[in-house]
């Protein structure tokens, strides 16, 4: 004889199965792919930032992590599923008893609220981690961009100094032909020219490598960056002490540490709530074939926390919470030290670059021009010209290096503190 509860059980099972399948279907939106875009001949910093923020695979992974945490937050709000049970007593048809029951667990205490709070904090952490990754990439792009820009200027300086060296060799050759200097002097001029040419070739090689490193940030290879547009001789302005203090309070590392404390507190609340056992309510029907009647079944069950009161998990959660507070202190102190050191490096290198550009280089250029003119008139020796040439070349290189170091320090500050809102609005 077929049980009268079979259609009910089949309908309930089919409805829950279809609901589970609909919730388990993956999202139809395709994952973002890194599509290589053509790069213009004159690449600006804003274009490089947009390319990187759009196509960098590490940033795409951080976005997916945020989406995963959003899904975890949805799951944290789910309530316990009901349970459908079927119990058959005695397999003989004449005396068989069939019981169909529906059990629903009921969470007691703030378990669900604690789960939601912890999941929300984890989702916020993923969002801040995404912002930190964006700040890191912006700093890398800015540093790489001005590295290429400085390398371009180094090549231009090398070309200019090579032209000066050729001019000195030409003057030495003319004076040799006029019998005013020995052949050794012409050889010295040619050796100096060869040395400048070697420096120029080295600068070209460094420019190629710097372009490759910059293009790799958005997934493009060699040849994607031919020329960039910008100035490498104007170092960035250092932020004020007030601005640094404001940005340090909202630095990604500090925000992550604070959110970790909030998440640990929610987890502690959840572990404390688990010490309160959950209640299970049961409702069903019992069919007795022998008696020919159906009886209602109502029940309540609750576990007894006699052997496991979740004491160890609660103690662990409390220690994790204390650990998160100590880590916040450590992160804040480390950030203050790094920011102070980087700010001083920015101030120092910027001052060096400006001093070389406005005071030292004009004097060195005048000294070289005077040495060349005096050599043509026979008042100075070739060594005076070569010394002035070498000094001018080294000072120009030092000015470019100081400016590049200032840009690297500024990019490091943006990585530590996240870019200013004005800079973000300009992108």
Image (spheres, rainbow, N blue to C red):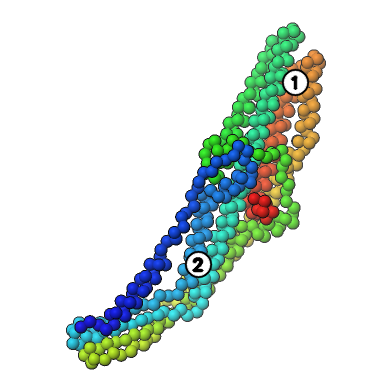
Res 259 seen here: yes
| Mark 1: few/some/many CA within 10 Å (<14, 14-19, 20+) | many
Judging depth in this view, the residue of 328 and 280 nearest the camera is 280
Judging depth in this view, the residue of 327 and 222 nearest the camera is 222
Write the residue at 59% across / 50% down.
136
Q: Residue 269 at x, y = what percent? A: 53, 73
**Relative to residue 311, is residue 354 depicted above or below?**
above
Local secondary structure at mark 2: helix
**Relative to residue 216, is residue 322 depicted above or below?**
below
The residue wearing badge 2 is 73
Query: With 11 as the anchor, is 239 left or right in this view?
Result: right
Write the residue at 57% across / 46% down.
51
Sequence-wise first label, 2 or 1:
2
| Mark 2: few/some/many CA within 10 Å (<14, 14-19, 20+) | many
**Relative to residue 119, is residue 333 depicted above or below?**
above
Tell me the mark number nearer the camera, choosing from 2 and 1: 2
> Based on the displayed image, in which of its 4 quarters is residue 301 positioned?
bottom left
Local secondary structure at mark 1: helix
Mark 2–mark 1 Cα distance, whole angstroms, equals 73 Å
Q: Residue 30 at x, y = what percent? A: 46, 55
Write the residue at 44% across / 60% down.
27
Which numbered marker is on residue 28?
A: none
The residue wearing badge 1 is 385
Res 339 seen here: no
Q: Residue 253 at x, y = what percent? A: 60, 57
Judging depth in this view, the residue of 257 and 34 nearest the camera is 34
Q: Residue 104 at x, y = what percent? A: 40, 80
> Based on the displayed image, in which of its 4 quarters is residue 86 positioned?
bottom left
Write the residue at 57% across / 35% down.
209
Judging depth in this view, the residue of 423 and 333 nearest the camera is 423
Q: Quadrant of the N terminus?
A: bottom left
């Amino acid at each position: 004889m077929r049980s009268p509860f079979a259609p009910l059980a089949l309908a309930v099972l089919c409805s829950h199965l279809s609901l589970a399948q609909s919730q388990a279907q993956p999202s139809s939106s395709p994952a973002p792919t890194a599509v290589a875009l053509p790069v213009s001949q004159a690449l600006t910093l804003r274009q490089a930032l947009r390319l990187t923020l759009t196509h960098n695979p590490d940033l795409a992974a951080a976005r997916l992590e945020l989406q995963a945490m959003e899904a975890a937050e949805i799951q944290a709000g789910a309530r316990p599923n009901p349970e459908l049970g079927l119990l058959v007593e005695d397999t003989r048809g004449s005396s068989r008893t069939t019981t169909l029951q529906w059990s629903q667990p009921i969470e007691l205490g703030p378990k669900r609220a604690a789960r939601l709070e912890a999941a929300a904090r984890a989702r916020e952490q993923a969002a801040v981690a995404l912002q930190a990754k964006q700040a890191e990439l912006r700093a890398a792009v800015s540093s790489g961009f001005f590295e290429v820009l400085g390398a371009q200027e180094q090549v231009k300086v090398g070309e200019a100094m090579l032209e000066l060296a050729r001019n000195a060799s030409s003057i030495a050759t003319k004076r040799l032909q006029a019998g005013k200097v020995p052949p050794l002097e012409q050889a010295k001029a040619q050796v100096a020219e060869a040395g400048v040419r070697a420096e120029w070739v080295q600068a070209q090689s460094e420019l190629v490598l710097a372009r490759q490193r910059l293009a790799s940030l958005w997934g493009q290879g060699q040849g994607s960056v031919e020329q960039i547009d910008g100035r490498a001789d104007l170092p960035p302005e250092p932020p004020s002490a007030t601005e640094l203090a404001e940005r340090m309070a909202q630095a990604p590392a500090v925000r992550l540490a604070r959110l970790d404390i909030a998440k640990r507190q929610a987890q502690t609340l959840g572990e404390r709530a688990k010490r309160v056992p959950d209640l299970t309510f049961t409702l069903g029907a019992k069919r007795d074939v022998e008696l020919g009647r159906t009886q209602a079944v109502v029940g309540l069950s609750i576990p007894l926390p006699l052997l496991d009161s979740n004491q160890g998990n609660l103690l662990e959660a409390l220690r994790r919470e204390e650990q998160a507070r100590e880590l916040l202190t450590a992160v804040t102190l480390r950030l203050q030290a790094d920011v102070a050191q980087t700010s001083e490096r920015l101030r120092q290198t910027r001052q060096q670059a400006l001093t070389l550009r406005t005071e030292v280089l004009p004097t060195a250029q005048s000294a070289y021009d005077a040495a060349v003119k005096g050599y043509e008139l026979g008042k100075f020796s070739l060594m005076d010209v070569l010394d002035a040439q070498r000094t001018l070349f080294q000072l120009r290189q030092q000015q470019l290096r100081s400016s590049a170091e200032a840009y690297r320090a500024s990019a490091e500050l943006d990585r530590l503190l996240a870019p200013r809102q004005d800079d973000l609005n300009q992108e």
